[in-house]
């Protein structure tokens, strides 16, 4: 079985470099075009999905619908983006450049960011530990039974930057938050392809392709990274 792990297309807040988290921001015109072009490219390659899972946030579900060309999308709260509490809506550079804001550790030192969240003890701010627990729960409850059954060929998962990194970390059976970001944040509408197999009672995840882009270079050049 193959998992196509997809990050949603761009939103107005992406272009403004605002943290989204649980805030439900729709795709902008560029994000819609990214998803449409990605869906067409996959369709032209003969790639179709047996199952489509998505975060319930509209930017992810709309991306899933356009990429999969399907209306049969199963949403799962485990695939929600990381909750950032009062950071949501704020511009990233205003926080990363602020020596008083622990958000400055989010990308550069995720272990320290996680420690600050735990110390804060406020439910609106979700720790990376909890995010990884959600990712692990989704894989064990939804993906691993499908892999064991062996009757499904391709699954699309439409998520977000941080939750997708947590899923990748859990697929590697690691809880080392120092490597949380790995090779970096997926580009918007980028897809990681993971081959899954079942051997000796264990589901094995093998990353075969990373950050595939199926839309035009013009669209890619119009987007600046969020972090």
Image: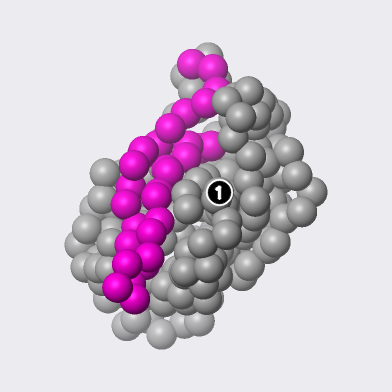
Mark 1, other Cα within 10 Å: few <14 / some 14–19 / many ≥20 = some
Asked if residue 199 lies in the magenta stretch, the reply is: yes
Between residue 115 and residue 219, name the one nearer to us.
Answer: 219
Part of the protein shown in magenta: 188-217
Q: Residue furthest right?
A: 71
Q: Main secondary structure of the magenta part?
A: strand
Asked if residue 213 lies in the magenta stretch, the reply is: yes
The residue positioned 36% from the left and 38% from the top of the image is: 209
Residue bearing mark 1: 154
Q: Report the number of discs.
A: 1
Between residue 142 and residue 99, name the one nearer to us.
Answer: 142
Quick check: 123 above or below 168? Answer: below
Could you say where residue 72 lies in the image, as x and y percent from the top left?
Answer: 77, 54
The residue positioned 67% from the left and 41% from the top of the image is: 68
Tell me if 129 is positioned left or right of 221 in this view.
left
Q: Specify the quadrant that holds the C terminus.
A: top left
Tell me if 36 is positioned left or right of 116 in this view.
right
Quick check: 85 above or below 190? Answer: below
- Residue 124 can be seen, yes or no: yes
- Residue 98 can be seen, yes or no: no
Quick check: 112 above or below 54? Answer: below
The residue positioned 54% from the left and 17% from the top of the image is: 216
**Does dot 1 land on a helix, a strand or a loop?**
strand
Could you say where residue 29 lies in the image, as x and y percent from the top left?
Answer: 70, 29
Could you say where residue 86 lies in the image, as x and y percent from the top left?
Answer: 53, 66
Could you say where residue 124 lies in the image, as x and y percent from the top left?
Answer: 53, 76
Q: How is the image coloured?
A: one colour
Q: Residue furthest top?
A: 218
Between residue 199 and residue 68, name the one nearer to us.
Answer: 199
The residue positioned 34% from the left and 76% from the top of the image is: 201
Q: Quadrant of residue 174?
A: bottom left
């Amino acid at each position: 079985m193959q998992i196509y792990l997809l990050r949603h297309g761009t939103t107005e807040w992406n272009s403004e470099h605002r943290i989204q988290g649980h805030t439900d921001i729709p795709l902008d015109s560029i994000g819609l075009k990214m998803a449409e072009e990605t869906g067409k490219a996959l369709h032209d390659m003969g790639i179709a999905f047996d199952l489509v899972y998505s975060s319930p946030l509209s930017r992810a579900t709309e991306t899933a619908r356009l990429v999969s060309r399907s209306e049969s999308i199963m949403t799962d709260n485990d695939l929600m983006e990381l909750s950032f509490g009062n950071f949501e809506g704020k511009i990233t550079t205003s926080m990363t450049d602020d020596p008083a804001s622990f958000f400055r550790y989010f990308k550069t030192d995720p272990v320290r960011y996680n420690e600050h969240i735990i110390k804060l003890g406020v439910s609106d701010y979700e720790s990376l530990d909890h995010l990884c627990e959600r990712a692990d729960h989704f894989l064990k409850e939804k993906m691993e039974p499908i892999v064991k059954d062996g009757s499904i060929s391709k699954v699309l998962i439409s998520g977000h930057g941080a939750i997708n990194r947590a899923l990748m970390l859990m697929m590697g059976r690691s809880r080392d938050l120092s490597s949380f970001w790995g090779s970096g944040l997926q580009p918007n509408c980028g897809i990681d392809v993971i081959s899954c197999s079942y051997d000796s009672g264990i589901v094995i995840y093998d990353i075969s392709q990373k950050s595939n882009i199926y839309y035009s270079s013009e669209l890619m050049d119009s987007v600046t990274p969020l972090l």
